[in-house]
Image (cartoon, rainbow, N blue to C red):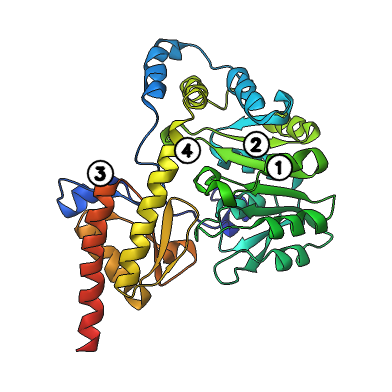
Amino acid sequence: MSIKIKEWISRMPEYIPGKTIEEIKEQYNLDRVYKLASNENLYGPHPGVLEEICKNLDDIKYYPDSECREIRQKLAEKYNVDRDTIIMGNGTDQIIEMICDSFIGPGEGVVIADPTFLIYEKSVVKYGGAAVKVPLKDFRQDVEMLIGSINDKTKILFLTNPHNPTGTNINRREFDYVIENINKDVLLVVDEAYWEYVPERERINTIEYLSGCSNLMILRTFSKIFGLAGLRIGYGIADRSIISALNKVRIPFNVNSIAQKAAAAALDNESCINEIRENIDKERNRFYDILNKNGIGFIKSYANFILINTGKNSDEIVEELLKNGFIVRPGENLGIPGYIRVTIALPEINEKFLSVFIKIFNNLYKKEKV
């Protein structure tokens, strides 16, 4: 008799993580490798955050504050909301799982774009539900189709803004359409992991909608522009009743003490993110200019990554980039074959990447023309 695994596990989509720097160094015998596959902020956290981390290392012998009081209070003051409307997680991934644990039962479901962040589907399947997938329209989330796909079994609608993996946005008109047309008994979860990268003139302040929308939940993170991806800390803001439900399924001590102190210090030194946003914006435009000059297609991005059209030779391009020390995300793994997703990094790294990428791209496609 063999051990039987739960049946739903066989239906769960597999998340394929990006390759590590050490893995590629060993595989290709390289001294220097640049990881441009996971959208980290390569500028890193503010020096004051690193100081705070070092200052609190001696406290790791104690369990962390299970309620994350300090960072929740700082977030409450930042957004002018009640502290009890905020929940912290080991990354927003964990909060997404809490949401599905609290709202999804067997036979119930969610509506998501296709493709999108895989954790939504993994989480709903884990709790016995299913995902209704709505194809992107011109690489953008089709809000009318998403709303139109909600049925009597739908418990949650997930939106990402900016969208991952395409980097496209939802504008205010589209967001207002969702708010005005979504059923009040359906939870609207807006994942804003890359929100701080959006230019201020085009950014939607979704926090302002919370007071009039008891079915709205906003997710943000310290993993992206704040440069704390390795510490895994994200947060959600919603009506107090929703947060209370999530806290009942939240495991104790789910956010470690160093992550809490680092996130609090990041908010104390928040002015640096404006400079990072401006730098990424300049570098993103450099990508656009060089790709345009070489006749290479791409999708305009509102995040710190760009989706590049690499055509039928995508696999070869990814492999050649690895040989040259650049890890990128194959579009095949993201549900967008024929593309690669590239993190916009520091200027000197971007320059090296673009030089190598253009040579590889032109060599592959020029061969076909000969």
User: Callout 3 environment at 10 Å: few (<14), some (14 to 19), or many (20+)?
Assistant: few
The nearer-to-camera label among 1 and 3 is 1
First of labels 1, 3 by sequence position: 3
At 61% across and 55% down in the image, what residue appears? 121
User: Circle 4 sits on which residue?
Assistant: 223
User: Circle 3 sits on which residue?
Assistant: 22
Image: 230 above or below 130: above
Horizontal relation, residue 312 to residue 258: left or right: left
Residue type at mark 2 is Gly
Camera sees residue 231: yes
Residue type at mark 3 is Glu
Image: 254 above or below 211: above
Give the CA separation, mark 3 to mark 2.
33 Å
Along the viewing direction, whichever of 55 and 272 lies nearer the viewer: 272
Horizontal relation, residue 318 to residue 195: left or right: left
The nearer-to-camera label among 3 and 2 is 2
The residue tagged with tag 4: helix, strand or loop?
loop
User: Circle 2 sits on which residue?
Assistant: 236
- The x and y percentages for residue 166 are 50, 61
Give the CA separation, mark 4 to mark 3.
21 Å
Give the CA separation, mark 1 to mark 3.
38 Å
Q: Are marks 1 and 3 in contact (CB under 8 Å)?
A: no
User: Callout 2 environment at 10 Å: few (<14), some (14 to 19), or many (20+)?
Assistant: many
Mark sitting on residue 217: 1
At 60% across and 22% down in the image, what residue appears? 74
